[in-house]
Amino acid sequence: MAVDGTAVDGTAGRVTRRRRRTRANLLDAAFSVFAAKGFGHVSIEEICERAGYTRGAFYSNFTGLDELFFALYTERAELIAEQVAGALAQDGPDLDVPAAVDRVTEVLLLDRDWLLVKTDFLVHAARDPEVARALLEHRARLRRAVEDRLARAQGHTELPAALTDARGAAHAVVAAYDGVTTQLLLDRDVTAARAWLKQLLTALLSPDNSRHRKGRSPWMPTSSSSERDSRASSRPTN
């Protein structure tokens, strides 16, 4: 027995597992309630009722709705970043753009409920600098997952020179995702959203073959205007 009367060893392990299960159930219930009603319109009682727990169980895991909401967003955002990284890691050094786009699209457009919760968190972060910093860090993780994969593809897979580097390409991918998800929230057409996101990401990451020069490495800068003028002046005239 511990000093406070709590059993240790096996019993403590069971208590820890039970507490983790309680926390997970509260997060699942909160996800459903937040998606249905919005962050500013949800009470602790509603979440407890949905999860089947008392307020005491809630407060043994969270100090309040803000902490719960942040924990929920963190859990889901980190899962998506991991899934995107996993989807992009299935190729070798070469990046199969169409296949990678298909896999990433399936991960990013999980469901409309998540997009509602994510948008609520964005609005919350816009009014709270501390929450905004946390949101920016989680968004950066998603961008880094894309950036790291594109950086590995350099020298192996031709990518658009207009994107200049892996970091710029990653920002463009996340921006395309943001735009498509906004449309999805309004028209609720998941099929169209998937098609649009695939088209946008494919266009962003596919090289412009009309401008491709044989032997040029991906994202290598084109020759300067002075170099082009010099070559032009050295050509023989008729």
Image: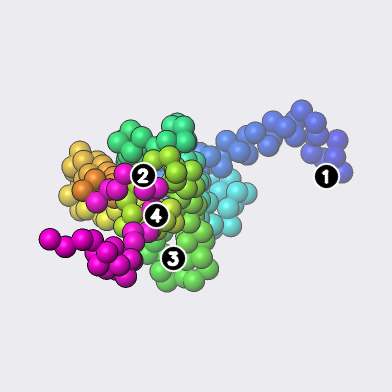
Residue at the spot x=47%, y=60% of the render?
135
Question: Visible in this render: residue 52?
Answer: no
Q: Percent x, y for residue 7? A: 80, 34
For the residue pair 148 and 119, the one nearer the viewer reads as: 148
Colouring rule applied to residues: rainbow
Which structural element holds mark 1?
A: loop
Looking at the image, residue 39 lies above or below residue 154: below
Please give the residue where the numbered disc 1 appears in the rendered image: 4
Precedes in sequence: disc 1 or disc 2: 1
**Of marks 4 and 1, the one in the foreground:** 4
Q: Percent x, y for residue 144? A: 48, 51
For the residues marked 1 and 2, what is the alpha-carbon distance in whole angstroms? 73 Å
Image quadrant of residue 169? bottom left
Secondary structure, magenta segment, majority class: loop
What amino acid is at disc 2?
A: Gly
Residue at the spot x=54%, y=57% of the render?
67
For the residues marked 4 and 1, what is the alpha-carbon distance in whole angstroms? 67 Å
For residue 90, which numbered disc appears in the image? none
For the residues marked 4 and 2, what is the alpha-carbon distance in whole angstroms? 11 Å
Mark 2 closeness class: few <14, some 14–19, many ≥20 residues within 10 Å: few
For the residues marked 4 and 3, what is the alpha-carbon distance in whole angstroms? 38 Å
Please give the residue where the numbered disc 4 appears in the rendered image: 220
Please give the residue where the numbered disc 3 appears in the rendered image: 125
Q: Percent x, y for residue 103? A: 35, 35
What amino acid is at disc 1?
A: Asp
What amino acid is at disc 4?
A: Met
Please give the residue where the numbered disc 2 appears in the rendered image: 215
Q: From the viewer's perspective, tell me whether residue 4 is left or right of residue 40.
A: right
